[in-house]
Amino acid sequence: MTMLAAKAPFDFDATLRFLRGFPPTSGEQRVDRDSLTKALRAGGQTLVATLKAAEGGLEVSYAAAPTPAAEAEAADRLSFYLGLEDDLAEFYALGRSDAAFAPVVEALYGYHQVKFPSPLENLVWAILCQRVPMPVATKAKQALVAHVGNDRDAFPDLDQLLSLDQDELTALIGNTTKGARLHAALRRWAETDERHLRTAPYGEVKEFLQSLPGIGPWSASFILIRGLGRMDEAPVDRELLRSASAVYGPLSEDKARELAATYGPWQGYWAHYLRAAGLVRRAA
């Protein structure tokens, strides 16, 4: 049994509600009334982790005993994935001073951003989902996962993805351009370190991401926020405009940018809460 500490306030029920409504990872984990079961790769092993609320955070149990190295890597991965170390005090202070947004804070109070299970998975998804309907991107992702064949369909780790040549990737994805981009992007990704991407200056990480084949400004921002938890910016797209307009009333792009700017380094969290509130409303 492993204990993962969470920075208070933390509401695991809010985590589970979000996961039930998040389309890109739908069906990739089991979400029960009070627990989450997730398969992941760590330390070269495929682990099946079950997480439940405990005093001060979450308790994690594994279907089979991991090696000490794999357990340590899995603890870091799960904690980061579920945003357990996020300190939301400043964000909540800003949100409660915003009359229109304050009800969103109260509705999601204690919810820490659930990221993609890894920034690597986010990178792959960002390439697969470009200019195609979500079911098409989902089918391509499922083909990659099935081909590697990890237990419980755990998403492949970097070594497993690097073992696939460009022709294999193209055949699995069903798109020559995306196969080439993914093949090249994975090799560039292997030249860096996730810890560096989590902590290096924001502009440096953004520049690196935009240098990857197939990753433009929108995809880079997507990975920064949803894969790396870097909340410095909130790109205004149609989804954010729709979510923000549901809270503030009809907004122009310029007005949405002005609102985001008032949240400073928390604007990514502001945008994510707006989207998460929309998921909750649609699921209700």
Image (spheres, rainbow, N blue to C red):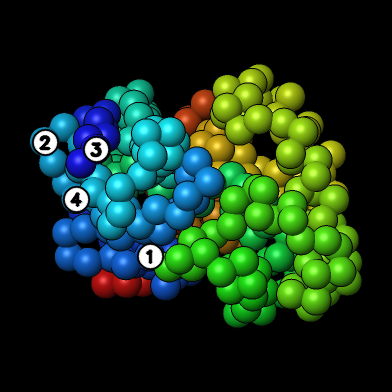
Q: Which mark is residue 29?
A: 1
Which of 240 and 34 lies nearest the eye of the viewer? 34
Circle 4 sits in a helix, a strand or a loop, which is it? strand
Query: Could you tell me residue 185's position as x and y percent?
Result: 80, 48
Query: Could you tell me residue 182's position as x and y percent?
Result: 79, 57
Question: Can residue 81 be seen from the camera position used here?
Answer: yes
User: Considering only order in the chain, which callout, 1 or 2, is on the residue closer to the N terminus?
Assistant: 1
Circle 3 sits in a helix, a strand or a loop, which is it? strand
User: How many angstroms separate mark 2 from mark 3 (CA)?
Assistant: 13 Å
Depicted 237 relative to depicted 43: above or below: below
Which of 170 and 149 lies nearest the eye of the viewer? 149
Mark 1 is surrounded, within 10 Å at the Cα level, by few (under 14), some (14 to 19) or many (20 or more) other residues, namely many
Query: Could you tell me residue 268's position as x and y percent?
Result: 52, 39
Apparent side of residue 20 relative to residue 135 in the rendered image (left or right):
left
- The amino acid type found where label 2 is placed reads Glu
- The amino acid type found where label 3 is placed reads Thr
How many dots with numbers? 4
Q: Nearer the viewer, mark 2 or mark 3?
A: 3
Residue at image mark 4 = 52
The image quadrant of residue 161 is bottom right
Circle 1 sits in a helix, a strand or a loop, which is it? loop
Depicted 30 relative to depicted 233: above or below: below
Query: Could you tell me residue 47's position as x and y percent?
Result: 39, 53
At x 24% / y 45%, what residue is drawn?
60
